Image (cartoon, rainbow, N blue to C red):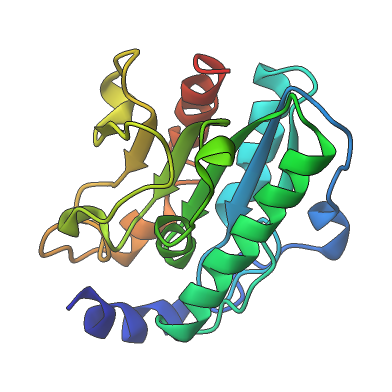
Amino acid sequence: MFIKNFIAPVLLFTSAFAAPAAELETRQSCGPVKLFHAAGTFETGLGSVGIPLSASLASAVPGATSQAVIYDTSAEYSATVVAGSAIMAAAVNAAATACPNQKFVLSGYSKGALVVHGVTLSSAVKARVIAITVFGDPARNINSPFPINSASVDQTPRDGSSSSQNVASFCNTGDLFCWPLGWSLPAHLAYPTDGSIGVAASFIKNRA
């Protein structure tokens, strides 16, 4: 049912967080950790959350690299999500082949979180996923699975995480898309600037 409520409000912020192409360039080195991030509706490249998360992770984990999952971010939440999940899976599989010792982090904001939920990986590749971070996840309240072994979700990561938790789900109070009966679009847009990015980078670092 969240899809019905997801479409109309998201049309209000079509271009506020579009990213310049130069910021979306994929770094191809075999660093210790690689972040794959799927942006939100109407965003491009790494998007509003992925750009600062990539920078923060690079500072927290020397040598860490990032890759934008380039998929159709239009306001359609069925076929484009399935296609986006396949694109993310293909990107992770390619990195797994190219960089045998690299570990992976999957991430998504808003619609991008739905993409993460749909990713299917082999057991060997999934074993190399060390953390997942999602922001404003519309599927947060329906127990949708995550592509990581022994998924343990921290739903309040800003309050701290246990060592066994490997998924950080950020949802601001009142967020229109992830909070039960949410009402606030500003809450959904706040993740790049409300401290969530630094917490997410530390969460990843502690599992790298």
Quadrant containing the N terminus is: bottom left
Q: Position of residue 4 (x, y in %)?
A: 24, 85
Closer-to-camera residue (34/93) = 93
Q: Is residue 136 above or below residue 129?
A: below
Q: Residue at x 61, y 76 (%)?
A: 15
Question: Which quarter of the picture shows residue 44?
Answer: bottom right
| x and y percentages locating residue 139 in the rendered image | 27, 61
Residue at the (50%, 40%) spot, across then down: 123
**Depth order, front residue of 34/198:** 34
Image quarter of residue 74: bottom right
In the image: residue 131, left or right of residue 73: left
In this rendering, the answer to whether 132 lies above or below 141 is: above
Q: Is residue 155 left or right of residue 62?
A: left
Does any portion of residue 47 appear in the rendered image?
no
> Is residue 33 placed above or below 43 in the rendered structure?
above
Q: Is residue 140 among what the camera can see?
A: yes
Residue drawn at x 60%, y 51% is: 37
Residue 72 horizontal/vertical position (percent)? 61, 79
Q: Tell me the quadrant of the picture where the C terminus can be found.
A: top right
- Percent across and percent down for residue 28 are 88, 42
User: Is residue 107 shown above or below 205?
Assistant: below
Position of 178 compared to 167: left or right? Answer: left
**Numbered label tally:** 0
